[in-house]
Image (cartoon, grey):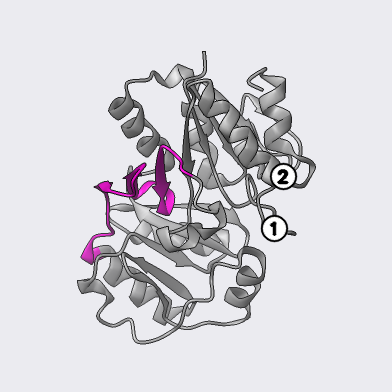
């Protein structure tokens, strides 16, 4: 019996073409709630990037790839940040290679610099128009996540140098760097404990490499057809593309609607 469902946002609920979530999906959320199923968001976005949810009242929010957990009233009750030592390494490498890197903090994101790679991602997400500026003092800030524009080989080399961080990727252009062991999957377990439901009674939807562990940890993991291979490999079921109503298709397949 499914008691809770966790939804990724970009590429899962949110189309990269329309940049909207279909109203039919929101209507279906109401149906699921009436059945007593709790609904949660599990996104790589920060809090100020979730305007795309149209203020829908979810039962909780996982943001920054699991670094922050908020309850239904947006009260923060769990958070993880990147340690000062690793921030120093990331900044040093960003200057040496160099590469654009966005640092997500409680009050927003700042890039060391922007180039065409950052602009191209903003065209896709409509969520990465943050400014660039001096990040020399970023090591003294509370940083939840670093958005590093590296290829996969560069990513591996950087992560080897970090002491308490790991990376995940949902797009070829960049990876997200977060504190070690604080993924969407771990945050999902925090909510399970908080609300008293078992993980085998959880369904999770995702499309990227940063969703893979979440789908693997859930009782039923659903990957979008437009998702990455690593995500699909961890899923119990691969549904249709986000632009083909993939979420709705899966909910019908599992007879939840």
CB under 8 Å between discs 2 and 1: yes
Name which residue lies at 24% across and 80% down.
137
Furthest residue toward bottom:
134
Asked if the stretch drawn in magenta spans residue 105, the answer is no
Please say if 138 is above or below 73: below
Please say if 74 is above or below 216: below
Q: Residues within 10 Å of mark 1 (few under 14, many from 20)?
A: some
| Most foreground residue, 152 or 239 | 239
| Most foreground residue, 67 or 71 | 71
In the image, which disc is placed on residue 126?
none
Kind of element beneath mark 2: helix
Q: Residues within 10 Å of mark 2 (few under 14, many from 20)?
A: many
Please say if 32 is above or below 214: above
Region rendered in magenta = 57-85
Q: CA distance from mark 2 to mark 1?
A: 9 Å
Residue under label 2, please give it: 242
Please say if 34 is above or below 99: above
Mark closer to the chain start, 2 or 1: 1
Name which residue lies at 66% across and 22% down.
257
Residue under label 1, please give it: 16
Asked if the stretch drawn in magenta spans residue 66, the answer is yes
Residue 217 point in image, percent of width and height = 46, 27
Furthest residue toward top:
1
Locate residue 173 relative to residue 83 in the image: left or right: right
Residue 78 point in image, percent of width and height = 26, 45
Residue 200 point in image, percent of width and height = 46, 17
Locate residue 138 relative to residue 8 in the image: left or right: left
């Amino acid at each position: 019996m499914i008691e809770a469902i966790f939804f990724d946002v970009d590429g899962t609920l949110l189309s990269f073409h329309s940049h909207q979530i279909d109203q039919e999906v929101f209507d279906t959320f109401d149906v699921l709630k009436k059945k007593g199923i709790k609904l949660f968001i599990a996104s790589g976005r920060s809090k100020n990037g979730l305007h795309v949810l149209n203020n829908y009242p979810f039962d909780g929010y996982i943001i920054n790839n699991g670094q922050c957990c908020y309850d239904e009233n947006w009260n923060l009750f769990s958070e993880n940040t990147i340690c000062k030592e690793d921030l120093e390494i990331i900044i040093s490498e960003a200057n040496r290679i160099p590469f654009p890197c966005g640092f997500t903090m409680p009050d927003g994101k700042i890039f060391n610099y922007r180039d065409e790679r950052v602009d191209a991602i903003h065209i896709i997400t409509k969520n990465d128009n943050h400014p660039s500026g001096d990040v020399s003092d970023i090591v003294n800030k509370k940083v939840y996540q670093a958005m590093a524009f590296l290829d996969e080989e560069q990513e591996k080399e950087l992560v080897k140098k970090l002491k308490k961080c790991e990376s995940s990727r949902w797009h070829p252009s960049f990876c997200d760097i977060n504190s070690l062991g604080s993924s969407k999957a771990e945050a999902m377990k925090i909510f399970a404990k908080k609300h008293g439901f078992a993980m085998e009674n959880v369904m999770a939807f995702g499309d990227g490499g940063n969703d893979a562990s979440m789908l693997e940890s859930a009782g039923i993991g659903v990957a979008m057809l437009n998702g990455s291979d690593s995500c699909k490999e961890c899923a119990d079921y691969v549904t249709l593309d986000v632009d083909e109503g993939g979420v709705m298709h899966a909910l019908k397949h599992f007879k939840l609607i």
